[in-house]
Amino acid sequence: MNETFALSAVVTAMLAVTLPWAKRRIELSLAKHPSLTGHSRMAKRVASLVPGYAYDATRFFNSDHAPVAVVARRRAGLARLASLYTERYARSLALTAQAAEGLSDLQFTGAYRVPFQYSPYLRQQLRVASFVRESAGVTITDLDGNVFYDLTGSYGVNVFGQDFYKQCIAEGSARAQTLGPLLGSYHPCVVDNIARLREISGLDEVSFHMSGTEAVMQAVRLARYHTKRTHLVRFCGAYHGWWSDVQPGPGNPDKPRATYTLKEMDGDSLRVLRTRRDIACVLVNPLQALLPTKGAPGDASLVDSARRAAFDRLAYTTWLHQLREVCTQRGIVLIFDEVFLGFRLAPGGAQEYFGVRADMVTYGKTLGGGLPVGVVCGRKALMKRFREDRPADICFARGTFNAHPYVMATMQVFLEQLDTPAVQAIYHGLDARWDARAAQLNRRLQEADLPVQVANLSSVWTVCYTQPSRYNWMLQFYLRAQGLALSWIGTGRLVFSLNYRDADFEEVVSRFVSAAQAMQADGWWWHDATLTNKAIRRGILRELLAHRC
């Protein structure tokens, strides 16, 4: 009897311990995105198993089993493109090839412009230049004198146009010239920058860093320091720099650590935030409003036409308010990562645009006025890096070039310009202007019966494809041939500066449509009823398995 009672007590105690743990584990699993992007450990294992293989000349042109006549059109089309690139961009290509021998960045971006199976053959036939000599207005000019409309946005830096940043740098350099690159002490302009950033962010204190990645690192470190909790929450697909804790899957050789990657705009994720006790902070990149739970839309992953994007301002605002509520209730630090999107949507950034206040905000890119910078703004209680009662318990963060005089002076000019009537006028009707432009391009594409549409979050756009195809990634090369400059990720992200006039944009529309028509004429969008996105993915899976054997 006593033994039975003791055994029952042990079992009851074990259940009391394990059932809540199991419940939390199930809740966490439900909050993760069902794809590999939500399961970093599994994603890394799968990535390590993907075999390297490349299509030969035959397979390159008929991986979708197109008819012989269509394949011939594709061959002729690529040959014309290659000839055009070789003749038109000769000097730019030559310098790119020379630099690539010793610049690993160029080797990487060159290899990952398109899906890996096509990349080796394409690089033999068609080379892309990476050198330019000047910029003006909304255009850039390469070494051969070719003028391109700039759709790169300088990775988010270029909000107001290159001339704006040239002015910021020139005036900032003049202000800092007397002091020079003296480090350790501060230029007086730092005081103005602090005051302005406190006003913009609505937060108490500021720290300066040399990149957006560094700023996010410091914000997360401070959140862990003050909450005494271990884990950060990031949302599936969001980019927060390239350091280990915010890039836990493929691309990071380290094992995933104290990071939960959850679904965005999902009740299961809110449930995890309400119940777990180890979460120090939640990182939000408002750029994900365009692609919730999806990764950066590079053309290297454009294996079919499944890319989808859409922006619902009301729905995302509601989501941010829900996050704000649960983070407040649970003592979790809510961090807005505005490194990319800051100042593009509103003078007060995403906080102003969505009407939600974070506990900490990180800025970068455009805030430096064209120079490298990272900034953390936060509540006073979260920004302190030491404890008076525990002098050895500190949260260290220093950097040689933090608050560099030339960067601070250039930032001061940027912030002053932000308050001018000319810049403030740019924000008036901003969403309506860019939504109308996206609709204009979509209408023209539809009228031309082209299988392409765009989705936009203000001036940040993603190209989507409406008909199953294995060759959508070819569009980037036709767009470049029409004088539209893209970043290395291709059609996944077009970033316009806000100084585009209607006439400039009309020229972009005409060139975009012409590029798509040329690609269609060359047979890359051939299609029949058997070619579905599911069929394409199954075919690629069979190839992968065959090359593993």
Image (cartoon, grey):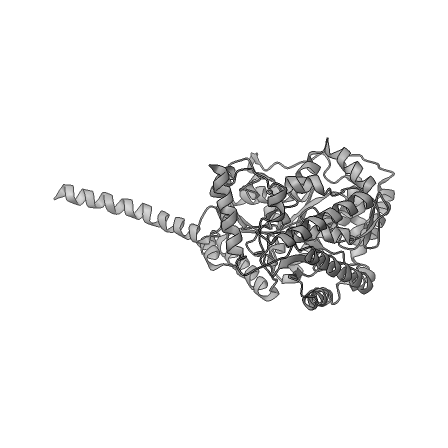
Q: Give the answer, above or below, for where 483 lies relative to 392.
A: below
Residue at 78% over, 54% down: 482
Task: Find residue 66 and report its horizontal and vertical position in percent.
Answer: 59, 53
Residue 53 pos. (x, y %):
56, 38
Q: Position of residue 526 (x, y in %)?
A: 62, 57
Determine the residue positioned at 60% across, 64% down: 312
Please give the count of numbered marks on the rendered protein: 0
Of 167 and 300, nearer the camera is: 300
Picture quadrant where residue 210 is located: top right
Residue 37 visible in the shown view: no
The residue at 77%/62% (across/down) is 510
Q: Position of residue 531 (x, y in %)?
A: 54, 57
Residue 245: name its quadrant: top right
Q: Residue, x 47% and y 59% (percent of image)? A: 267
Where 1 falls versus 318 (above or below)? above
Asked whether, in this view, residue 50 is left or right of residue 502, the answer is left
Q: Could you say which is closer to the camera, residue 223 or residue 49?
A: 49
